[in-house]
Image: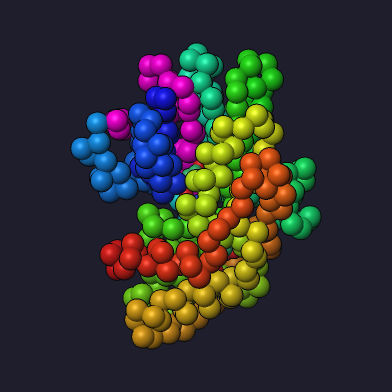
Amino acid sequence: MRVLVTGAAGFLGSHLTDRLLGEGHTVLGIDNLSTGNLGNIAHLKSESRFAFEERDICQPFDPGKVDAVYNMASPASPPEYLRLALETLRVGSVGTENTLEIAHKYGAVFLHASTSECYGDPLEHPQTENYWGNVNPVGPRSVYDEAKRYAESLTMAYNRYRGVNTHLVRIFNTYGPRLHPSDGRVISNFVMQALRGEPLTVYGNGQQTRSFCYVADLIEGILRLSRSDEHLPTNIGNPTEFTILECAEAVLEITATVTGKRSELRFEPLPQDDPTRRKPDISKAKKLLGWEPQIGLREGLKLSLDFFQSKV
Ligand code: NAD
Ligand code: UDP
C-alpha cells in the first residue's frame, strides 16, 4: 500500500510511520513542523519507501494515488494549542476536509486522530463512546476540543454522504519516546524535571486523574481500527487511572533509578477547564479489535527513559 500520514514528524505520526514501513508499505509523510520536528524522522533518511514533504494540510494538495490516509496533524499539547489557537481550529476543520477530499478522490481508507478531549470535563465515568461529553464551547480549550468534535462530524459526513471508508480513534493521553520534552504535557514535564533535579510542577491539588497509554499499544490499536469495518468513534487508551500525584510518584520512582535523587513537588494553579477525570471504557475496542494495552505506566516510563535522558 501507499500511505499518506499527516503530522508524520510529530510524536504519534512518526511512530505510526515506523510501523507502516515495518509492515512493508510505502509512506508519504506530510508535516508543517509547527509542533513536530525532523529529528523524529531523521532515522528514515535513507529509507527508500519513505518520502517527506513539508507543507500545511490547510492548503489543498494532491499526493497522487494513495490507499490509506492517517490524519494525525494537529497541535496536541494544551500550551501548544493555546499558542496556535487559530491554526488548531483550521487544521481540525479545513485541514481535515482537505485530507478527506484526498481519501474520497482515491478511494482510500481514512483514519482521523480524535481525542478523549471530545468528552470535555466528563460527567460520566469511565467514558464510553456513547457519551456526548461536557465541553465548554467558548473556553480556552475550545479551540482544540471543538476543532476535534467538528472533525468527527465532518468525517462521519464523508462516510455517510460520500461513501468514504472512515475511522475515528478517540486517543487518550499517550506517552513514550519522541513525546516532545518541552511541549508541556504532564509526562514529559515530570520526567524532564525529575531528570534535571527540578521540582515537579503539579497543577491544582493533583487529585485530577488521567489514564496513560504507552505509544506502542496505541499504534497497535490505531492500525487495527483502521483495518476494521467500524466507522463510529472508538476509544483507544489504557484504562488504568492515576491521579496526577500518583503519576508524579511513578515518575519519581522510575527516574530515581538513574538519578539516585527524588525531586520535590511544586504546586501551581490549575489551568481553566482542566478535566477533573479521564478514563476510557475500552470494551468496544476489546470486543471489536481484540485489542487491549499490554504496557503499564511504570514499564512504559522505563522504556521512555533513554529518550528523555538524551534530551536533558
Ligand atoms: P505532535 O504535536 O507531536 O504531532 C502533531 C504533528 O502535526 C506535528 O508534527 C505538527 O507539526 C503537525 N501539524 C500540526 N498542524 C499541521 C498542519 N496544519 N499541517 C501539517 N502538519 C501539521 O502531537 P501528537 O501527540 O503526536 O498528536 C498527534 C495527533 O493525535 C493529534 O491530532 C492529536 O490531537 C492526537 N492526540 C494525541 C494524544 C496524545 O496523548 N499524544 C491524545 C489525543 C489525541
Ligand atoms: N499537569 C500537571 N503538571 C504539568 C503538566 C500537566 O499537573 O507540568 C496536569 C494537567 O493540569 C492535567 C494533567 O496533568 O490535569 C494532564 O495534562 P496534559 O497537558 O498532559 O494533558 P491533558 O490531558 O490535560 O490534555
Q: Find residue 220 and report its horizontal and vertical position in percent.
A: 52, 45
* Left or right: 272 as drawn, with respect to 129: left
Residue 46, by quadrant, is top left
Position of the C terminus, as image quadrant, is bottom left
Using the image, determine if residue 129 lies above or below residue 295.
above
Residue drawn 42% across the image and 28% down it? 4
**Is residue 215 or residue 6 the one in the foreground?**
215
Residue 165, by quadrant, is top right
Please give the range of residues in magenta: 49-76
State the scheme by which the image is colored: rainbow
Residue drawn 48% across the image and 74% down it? 251
* Main secondary structure of the magenta stretch: loop
Q: Find residue 124 and report its horizontal and vertical position in percent.
A: 79, 55
Q: Find residue 298 and report its horizontal and vertical position in percent.
A: 50, 70
Residue drawn 65% across the image and 73% down it? 207
**Is residue 76 or residue 3 the one in the foreground?**
3
305 in magenta: no
**Is residue 87 or residue 121 the one in the foreground?**
121
Using the image, determine if residue 143 lies above or below residue 70.
below
